[in-house]
Amino acid sequence: MKHGVFITGTDTGVGKTLVAAALALHLKKRGLSVGVMKPIETGTVAGRDSRSDAARLQSIIESEETIGAICPYSFELPVAPLTAAQLSDQSINPDTIRKIYQLLSSRYECMVVEGVGGVHVPITQSSNVMDLVKQLRLPVLIVGHSGLGGINHALLTIEALRRKKIHIIALILNRTEPVRSALARAQERSTVEILRKQAGLPVLGPLPYESGMPSRFRPTVMRLSRSAILKKVAVLALRSARRSR
């Protein structure tokens, strides 16, 4: 059952790594061999940052792949990939990412690939994250905010992916802030209800807010990997893979 999934976000900081790690761990616990990739990462030092997204993905499934294979392009400056590469006198080659992905995917039954930022984030002068997804020929799982602003960001992301004819597995809503007031609860309820009516695809969540992140990343991932929401995500991802064979 050779397949994979690309995890993108409606924005940065919405919980892509959390969902990617939890899904990879869940699939591994189901008995599948799982590979992970974070093709491009900014704001980290390659091979020396145990808190990087790539290092977290590597660690959570105890991958034997090198960090250089999991993350071919890593930049220290926390800016858009195109800018980070230019300021480092480097360039990002999507063909290199594709070749590494193909090599890794030949070793595993399932690949979980985490994107960088949102779908329109540029990675070269002429291509963005969506173009990379098309090259890898992967279906997409979107992670978005469950609160105020979540509707617009999610629908714009969905529309952009559909224009590129990229299959979307589902939208997962995540609480990135605690929902304490009656107003915040009403805003979240509105976001969830409207997206379930207008998104035209499965809308899951919201995932519970987790305090103490990222220092509690591992226990949070382990708990989330056992949740009903992740079980549903895995079912949808595997179903999508079977349809595409």
Image: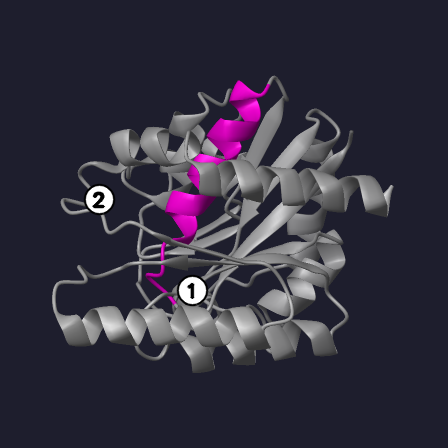
Residue labelled with disc 2: 214
Characterize the local packing of mark 1: few (<14), some (14-19) or many (20 or more) Cα atoms within 10 angstroms. many
> Could one spot residue 66 in this view of the protein?
no
Residue 186, percent from left and from top:
26, 74
Tell me: residue 228, above or below residue 204: above
Tell me: residue 32, above or below residue 45: above
- The image quadrant that residue 79 belongs to is bottom left
| Comes first in the chain, label 1 or label 2 | 1
In depth, the one of 15 and 68 nearer the eye is 15
In depth, the one of 175 and 59 nearer the eye is 175
Q: Residue at point 43% right, 35% down?
A: 57
Compared across the picture, whether 70 is left or right of 147 comes to right
Q: Which residues are magenta?
A: 12-30
Secondary structure of the residue carrying numbered label 2? loop
Q: Residue at point 47% right, 77% down?
A: 194
The numbered disc on residue 144 is 1
Magenta residue check for 123: no
Magenta residue check for 27: yes
Magenta stretch: dominant SS? helix
In depth, the one of 231 and 210 nearer the eye is 231
Q: Quadrant of the N terminus?
A: top right
In depth, the one of 96 and 184 nearer the eye is 184
Compared across the picture, whether 11 is left or right of 141 comes to left
What whole-number distance in Å separates the C-alpha atoms at marks 1 and 2? 18 Å
- Mark 1 and mark 2 residues within 8 Å of each other at the beta carbon: no
Q: Residue at point 44% right, 30% down?
A: 58
> Could one spot residue 187 in this view of the protein?
yes
Secondary structure of the residue carrying numbered label 1? strand
Residue 199, percent from left and from top:
58, 73
Tell me: residue 67, above or below residue 170: above
Amino acid, disc 1? Gly
Compared across the picture, whether 96 is left or right of 154 comes to right
